[in-house]
Amino acid sequence: MTDKQSKRAIALIDVNNFYVSCERVFNPKLRNKPVVVLSNNDGCAVARSNEVKALGVSMGAPWFKMKDLAKQHGIIALSSNYGLYADMSNRVMSILRQFSPDQEVYSIDESFLDLSTFKNQNHIKYGQTMRKRILLWTGLPVCVGIGSTKTLAKLANHCAKKQPHFNGVCDFNTLTTNALNNLLSKIDVGEVWGVGSKLAPRLEALGIKSVLDLKQANADRLRRQFSVVMQKTIHELNGIVCIELEDIAPPKKQILSSRSFGVPVRDFNSLAESITLYMSRAAEKLRRQQDFAGSVYVYIRTSPFKPDDPFYSNGMTIPLPSPTDDTRQLVSVVLWALKQLYKPNYNYAKAGVMLSDLVPAEGVQIDLFSPIQQTLKTNKLMMAMDSINRKIGKEAIKLASEGFKRPWKMKQENKSPSFTTKWSDTIKAG
């Protein structure tokens, strides 16, 4: 290990049971209670409190199979509240940005920070300061793992969560080689970032059962048996940096927006409302990353799990005459495509749209036949619409073709209020 590599200090900060924790911030009665947050249409468990995990409920377990267990143990089921979770995530990431200029937002509840330049800081105390500030300012509990690589930071975070004596912050860089190896020997190889339950059985068949076993394995041999990713993972476990932080997440090459319906949809108008809504959301994301779309894809399908219903699935890709980020133009195109795809007398279960062939806004060639004035008006209109929706609330301004009653919308029977993203849902002091 080189001197430069030995000085690396990468931290992974992860919110504990993120969706459940967000719900508990605004409903303290949920604390210390068994809580699950369900996926779209209240189907499967996508977040579990520690109390639910202790009952043996696995991630992705269908809710209908849990109902007897729920009655027996008082499990509280909540519908996903994605707007709330996204807003709380943004608040956490904003706080973490104060602790290091080198940040990679890895997921909605995880962020890497490079602390290498903070040489005079006690990183364990620094991690505890992060935890206290996030808890004080957002109400969310986090754990911090620190290592000389991202893979080791991930494992350190696992230890911070699972081993109480670390008190929520585990710094592998403070451990001796023997102490670290002893710790890694007690962790299953499936806990390694990039291994998981899929590759763990194959490694175990080779006698590689613990993280230490993988660390001491022959990287070149396992590259031939698995992939270059496995080779990099072994190097990272040995403190050799192979995966750098991404300060800015790369823009998405495609933007997908789709949902399953809460009830079967048969009529064209309901499908058109859903397609308009999904495209409106996709177009907003497109503008947020300052891109234009060169083509769109739209699809509809019935449920493949109902053998008594006739099955139908179809989709269409439409190249655009010139790239655009105008919601109105994009909606017009997908509604035209929907007319070609739609067949009556089917029970449609899902629909979606996808934006492809994305190009940066500054690199878009203006349509020769579109007046400059019209292009400028379109840009101002989209900016105004996005700005109002951010300030007042999602869908404060929308296309009428999105519909209003939406009987087909995703089932969310136990959804909590939006709290931080809708003025009408803000908590009022009595």
Image: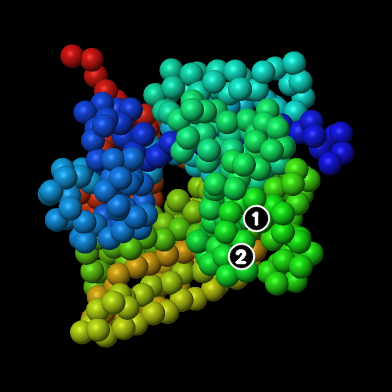
Instruction: Using the image as rendered, state which of residue 333 and residue 310 is in the foreground.
Output: 310
Residue at (53, 67) in percent of width and height: 201
Can residue 360 be seen here? The reply is no
The residue at which mark 2 appears reads as 207
Q: Position of residue 204 (x, y in %)?
A: 57, 65
Left or right: where 303 falls relative to 291: left
Q: Amino acid at mark 2?
A: Gly
Q: Label 1 neighbourhood size at 10 Å, few (<14), some (14-19), many (20+)?
A: many
Q: Position of residue 278 (x, y in %)?
A: 41, 57
Instruction: Using the image as rendered, state which of residue 129 and residue 422 is in the foreground.
Output: 129
Q: Which mark is residue 213?
A: 1
Residue at (42, 79) in percent of width and height: 314
Q: Tell me: residue 418, above or below residue 200.
A: above
Q: Which mark is residue 378?
A: none
Q: Tell me: residue 333, above or below residue 212.
A: below
Task: Please state, as top left, top right, bottom left or bottom right, where the C terminus lies in the image.
Answer: top left
Residue at (27, 23) in percent of width and height: 427
Q: Are marks 1 and 2 in contact (CB under 8 Å)?
A: yes
User: Label 1's element?
Assistant: helix
Q: Earlier in the sequence, mark 1 or mark 2?
A: 2
Task: Please state, as top left, top right, bottom left or bottom right, where the N terminus lies in the image.
Answer: top right
Distance from label 1 to label 2 (Cα)? 8 Å
Q: Position of residue 83 (x, y in %)?
A: 39, 40
User: Label 2's element?
Assistant: loop
